[in-house]
Amino acid sequence: MVEGGETKANQLINKFVISLTDGKILGFVTDINVEVEGDQFYFILKMKEVENLGKGQSMFSSERKLKIRPNDIVNVGPDVIILGNGKVPPLREIERLNQIAEEYNALVRELEAKERLIEKLKEENYGQTKQLDELQRELRKLQIMKEDFEHLKEQLVRQEGQLEMAKDYIRLLEGLRHDIDKIKEDVDRLLQTQLEEVVRGIINEELNARGLKKTSFI
């Protein structure tokens, strides 16, 4: 008898066999053998069939043998063996599937939470991107203002240079005006002297013509 299969087979003796798919009691196990075919083994259940069940006069009748595979067994309890005939997975498999379902649901919830977080981050990123665009526009405005300021500064420097040149020119004109005033005074004195000499010459000529004494002043 196959090791492992024998241990499990011993758990099947002295128990009722119930077909979950047929919904009826198949019999009561009195003995069991293990049969091996290739890499698969089967349980050969020796059972006594139950008659008149539910009529108050149930009793064991003839014996029969039932060949089942291990995966035909849904569950083994203290009193009964439940068979699914390959159509119902074993209870452990159902429990494992339930566990997988719970893990899947947990993953779905986690995924939904992460999707909500992603949406929130997208909204925050959109807001930050919008704010960044506004800051970049403000920065461009400030850069333009800076360029305008530098241009105005250059113009001011040029104008300051021109102003200094104008001041130097004005100072030069002031000096020239002083020189011009002095020249004018000299010219006025020269004209006055020449005028006096001309007038004196005319008077002296007139007096001389009249036989009068010449004058030395006007």
Image: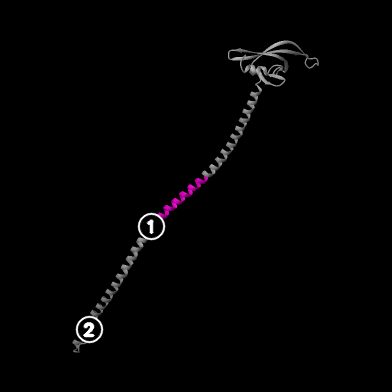
Query: Which residue does the image show at 74% across and 13% down from the upper left?
Result: 49
Kindly give the residue lying farthest to the right in the view shown: 56
In this rendering, is residue 105 above or below 5?
below
User: Where does label 1 land, which residue?
Assistant: 155
The quarter in which the N terminus is drawn is: top right
Q: Which residues are magenta?
A: 130-157
Residue 169 versus residue 65: which sits nearer the camera? 65
Query: Which residue does the image show at 40% across and 57% down from the upper left?
Result: 153
Residue 194 in the image: state x and y as whole percent: 23, 79
- 155 on left or right of 33: left
Q: Which disc, if any, is residue 171?
A: none
User: Where does label 2 land, which residue?
Assistant: 200
Instruction: Please tell me in which quadrant of the rendered image residue 169 appears.
Output: bottom left
Instruction: Please tell me in which quadrant of the rendered image residue 115 appears.
Output: top right
Residue 154 versus residue 45: which sits nearer the camera? 45
Which colouring convention does the figure follow?
one colour
Residue 85 appears in the rendering: no
Residue 65 appears in the rendering: yes
Q: Magenta includes 135? A: yes
Mark 1–mark 2 Cα distance, whole angstroms, equals 65 Å
In this rendering, is residue 80 above or below 194?
above
